[in-house]
Structure formats: structure tokens, C-alpha cells
Amino acid sequence: MPLRPDEFGEVQPTPPELIDRAFETPDVRPPPVGDDFEWTIQPVPLEVLLRSTWIPDCPVTVDQLAYVTVSHWGFDQKFHTGELMVNAAVADDIVEVFRKLHEIRFPIEEMRVIRLEEIDAHPTGDWNDTTSFVCRPAVGSGSWSQHAYGTAVDINPFHNPYLKGDLVLPELASVYLDRADQRPGMILSGDEVLQAFSDIGWGWGGYWNSLKDWMHFSLSGG
């Protein structure tokens, strides 16, 4: 899509096929056998590390990260297995959050580790990956994002976009800026997703004043 002077993509109207977005979940790991919550926590496998955004300049070492898999409900009305790289110190808490989301069947479109080449890829405006560790600066900042420490999680970014002034990320998600128009996959003030993160002491970007980051939860609250 065309770029703005700040090198983000130009914000464009949401295409009709994305207005009530509910795609089938691509499986990055074998799906769970039944309806019970399934999870794993382990050191980051080499094959996962090599397809992640981790490089030696990142603010955390590989040993400070953990590889987590959790089962989750999809928009296709099936359970799937997603993957996350997170800070090892918060791995148990993150599993408990997704255990609760599994119980309430909160739909998540896709949950996978972000690849290094995706950070600088030309914007498509329609990404919707639920993820944690991404070794990058905060949006519009030279400082490390909390994602670079593995202490932040973004959930369904298209359903829960970032808004600052005239900048919307993902750039085609403008229809989801109206938070009163409640649709599956959205995170709303006082809901069970927010409560699950609040129970582990994490803050929500939907409460920020200078901007809104409805997808974003973090240990620091920032």
C-alpha cells in the first residue's frame, strides 16, 4: 500500500470482506486433540529462534526467553494451537491468561512467532497476528518496545487496532475504531480478556490517553 511521509502505510477504508473479519485459523502447530486446554513451556528451540526476530543486539538473551504453546478458539469455531516467545519470567502467567481465554472461547485468528523479515516488510494493512516477543522499538520511538523484552502481548491487532492522531495500525482496520460497535475478537473495557490480564498485573493500551492501543497488554503497563 502507499506510504505516508512517516513511512507507515496510508490509512484506507476497510474493505467489505474485512468489516466483520472472521477467517479460518492457519495452524502453526498440530491442533489440540480435544476441547481441553493444552499448553507447553520450554526453552526456545533453535528452529524457532532462527525464524524469530531475535538478534544479538536485542535487550534480552535467548536464555531469558521461553517458547510457549497454548490452545485457543478460532473464528472458525475450532480449537487450534498457537505459539509465542515470551520472557521466561512471565511464561506461567501468560499460560494462565490464555487458559481463561480458552475457557470463554474468545476467538483468536492467528497466534505465531513473528519473523525478522516481517519487521521491515512493506505494509499490507491487514495483519492480525497475536504475538509477544518482537525485537523492535516502540511505535514512533527510538526506545525498545516492551515486546523486545517479551513482556507484552498483542491480541487480534486488526480487531483491536492502534490509533494515534491520523495513524491507524493496521492501516485497513478503521472500521474497528468504533469500540461501541461490538464484534467477536474485540477487547472491551471491563470484559473477561481485560480481567485475565489484570489478574496477572498487566496494563492495557486501551486505557492510554495520548493514544489508544487496544491490542496491547504489557507487564509495565506501557
Image (tube, rainbow, N blue to C red):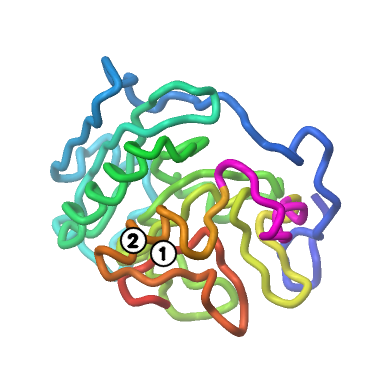
Which residue in the structure is indicated by mark 2? 197
Drawn side of residue 178 relative to residue 74, left or right: right
Identity of the residue drawn at 74% across and 77% down: 165
Q: Nearer the viewer, residue 137 or 146?
A: 146
- From the viewer's side, name the closer residue of 68 and 205: 205
Which residue ends up furthest to the front in the rendered image?
190
**Circle 2 Cα neighbour tier, 10 Å, few/some/many (<14 / 14–19 / ≥20):** many
Q: Around disc 1, counting alpha carbons within 10 Å, would you say few (fewer than 14), some (14 to 19), or many (20 or more)? A: many
In the image, is residue 85 above or below residue 212?
A: above
Which SS class for mark 1? strand
Decide whether residue 17 is among the magenta residues: no
119 versus 35 height, above or below: below
Which residues lie in the magenta part? 173-185
Which of discs 1 and 2 lies nearer the camera? The answer is 2
Q: Residue at x 20, y 53 (%)?
A: 91
Q: Amino acid at mark 1?
A: Phe
205 horizontally vs 171: left or right = left
Most foreground residue, 6 or 23:
23
The location of residue 123, given as percent across then percent down, is 69, 51
Q: Residue 178: within the magenta?
A: yes
Give residue 86's position: percent from left, percent from top.
27, 54
Which quadrant of the figure has residue 132?
bottom left
Q: Residue 74, how many percent across, how many down?
A: 48, 30
Q: CA distance from mark 1 to mark 2?
A: 7 Å
According to the image, label 1 marks what residue? Answer: 217
**Residue 73: x %, y % from top left:** 42, 31
Residue in front for this viewpoint, 207 or 171: 207
